[in-house]
Image (spheres, grey):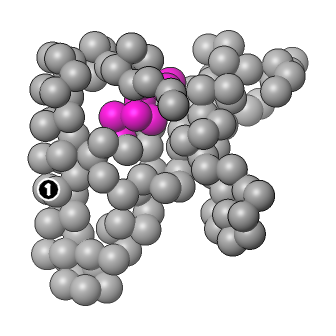
Amino acid sequence: MRRITLRQSALRFLIVSNHGGRAEESGQATIGVLAEVVDSVGGRIPVLIDGGVRRGTDVLKALALGAAAVGIGRSYVWGLASFGEAGVDRVLQILDDEFITIMRQVGALDITHITRRCVTSA
């Protein structure tokens, strides 16, 4: 990927999303391109990720690869459709519990300790 040019732009953030773009097999997962996008913007604007986040481990990976924030759209919709507000609360609790567990496993005391060293690429 070439360096993303942001000259005199009103752009305040960038969202990495494929919104169903993997319906055919040649599309890339958002997590697979996140680090490249983060590196391309060079810290000039925050990069968010939306897509493919189902577990707390996904949240940690996204933050470790440089995401400033993580969207969890489909997960909360499943909770809402199944059990209403209580379902959304449960989805958020599960994600939070999983996220805290994986933070402990990688030795991150808080989110400032989540860096690329927390993940490896295969």
Q: What stretch is highlighted in magenta?
A: 59-66
Q: In which quarter of the image is the N terminus?
A: top right
Q: Which of 81 and 35 is in front in this view?
A: 35
**Residue 5 visible at all:** yes
On screen, 86 above or below 94? below
Residue drawn at x 22%, y 22% as measured from the top left: 106
| Label 1 secondary element | helix
On screen, 51 above or below 35? below
Q: Which of 22 and 91 is in front in this view?
A: 22
Direction from residue 5 to residue 116 in the image, left or right? left
Residue drawn at x 13%, y 26% as measured from the top left: 104
Residue drawn at x 16%, y 27% as measured from the top left: 105
Instruction: Choose top left, top right, bottom left or bottom right for residue 35.
Output: top right
Direction from residue 101 to residue 95 in the image, left or right? right
Give the residue at the far bottom of this rendering.
Answer: 82
Residue drawn at x 53%, y 55% as measured from the top left: 51
On screen, 57 above or below 6? below
Residue 60 lies within the magenta run: yes
Instruction: Choose top left, top right, bottom left or bottom right for residue 39.
Output: top right
Q: Is the magenta stretch mostly helix, strand or loop?
A: helix
On screen, 27 above or below 113? below
Direction from residue 36 to residue 92 in the image, left or right? left
Circle 1 residue = 93
**Residue 41 visible at all:** no
Local crowd size for mark 1, using a 10 Å CA cut-off: few (<14), some (14–19), many (≥20)? few
Residue 29 lies within the magenta run: no
Instruction: Give coordinates of residue 78: x percent, y percent.
Output: 33, 77
Q: What residue type is labelled 1?
A: Gln
Instruction: Give coordinates of residue 114: x percent, y percent.
Output: 32, 19
Instruction: Give coordinates of residue 12: x percent, y percent.
Output: 65, 31
Direction from residue 115 to residue 17 in the image, left or right? right
